[in-house]
Image (cartoon, grey):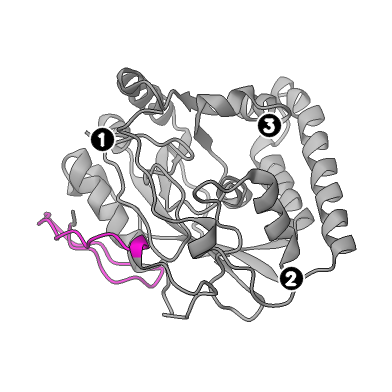
Amino acid sequence: MSAWLPTAPCTPGDCVTVAGPRAGVAHRVLRLAGCLTVLVAGVLVAPLVRALAWLPAERLVRWWSRLLLASLGVRVRPIAAPGRQAGGSLLVSNHVSWLDILLVAAVRPGRMLAKTEVGRWPVLGPLTSWGGTIFIDRDRLRALPGTVEEIAAALRRGERVVVFPEGSTWCGRGGGRFRPALFEAAVRADVPVQPLTLRYRTADGRPSTAPAFVGEDGLLASMWRVVSVRGLTAEVEFLPQLPPALFPGRRRLAAAAQRVVDQRRLPDGAPSDAPGCAACAHPVERPVRSPGAIGTGAGAAGVAGVGAGTAGAAGR
């Protein structure tokens, strides 16, 4: 693995806890079986959806993603989701879990950015490829400019592209810096950046770290934790769009997106179910002046100019 790849200090032992009511073993097994059924159905149906252009592909993706999350016992709660919008946009979000991809797709589907290894995975590989995923070689820094241009071309065609600019998963109690490189695509295509904040909560409303997929965590172990939780809710909050014209340059645009996302990670100050993760918080970046301010209709403080997923792209 390349040394330039971003990493998070979070580990399953230090950051991840399953708190609150738990499902019984039989219930967990049934959830996993249901997940496998929905997943296989998606693999079988995906080629048909791609072949028949008249089918409502986006609606089907949202429905399938919600069904897959429901099979795992996860309830989706969109917050301040805007109506249908024309034109391309770059959706950027904090990154906590493999569930993040399904959560975004359940509310606002788009082309995902993923590491090349995902395309070779059994079952999931073909599914992600049919879904139009843009792949990036995490071990080849020279491949990054080509990936940025591929994203920019998709944005110019009016498509939505989803990236996780932290470049690594965090436990949710803190987060990494948004690497600026992928924001260059929005600058080149002159399309807005749509920041999202993803949060996971227990049945009593406390922030949950159970879905976090961090450190040396294994996928099966992570899935078992998720299906063990009763009443797990996944929130996706839409924040004000950031036009590149107000934040000249990828670095200012990345810093602006990070600032608004950070403000909404734990908006109510509720204690997490994890005992502590002091290493998670990154230093607060100093604001950078911009031509104007952007209000936060979703409830975050105003932005006055500041400054993958799996993809793991680093800023330059």
Q: Which residues are magenta?
A: 279-305
Is 310 placed left or right of 7 in the picture? right
Marks 3, 1: nearer the viewer: 3
The majority secondary structure of the magenta stretch comes to loop
Would residue 33 be seen by someone viewing this image from the given angle? Answer: yes
Is 122 placed left or right of 202 in the picture? right
Q: Nearer the viewer, residue 49 or 76?
A: 76
Residue 279 placement: quadrant: bottom left
Q: Amino acid at mark 3?
A: Leu
Residue occupied by mark 3 = 124
Q: Judging from the image, what secondary structure is the residue with disc 3 in?
A: helix
What residue is drawn where x is 37% and y is 46%? 166
> Is residue 298 found inside the magenta-colored segment of the image?
yes
For the residues bearing labels 2 and 1, Cβ distance under 8 angstroms: no
The image shows residue 1, relative to residue 65, as above or below, that is above
Screen quadrant of the C terminus: top left
Q: Nearer the viewer, residue 214 or 128?
A: 214
The image shows residue 3, relative to residue 33, as above or below, that is above
Q: Judging from the image, what secondary structure is the residue with disc 1 in?
A: helix
- The CA distance from mark 3 to mark 1 is 31 Å
Residue 19 placement: quadrant: bottom right
- Other-residue count near label 2 (Cα within 10 Å), few / some / many at <14 / 14–19 / ≥20: some
What residue is drawn where x is 75% and y is 23%? 47
Screen quadrant of the N terminus: top left
Q: Judging from the image, what secondary structure is the residue with disc 2 in?
A: loop
Marks 2, 1: nearer the viewer: 2
Residue occupied by mark 1 = 187
Residue occupied by mark 2 = 230
Q: Amino acid at mark 2?
A: Arg
Q: Amino acid at mark 1?
A: Val
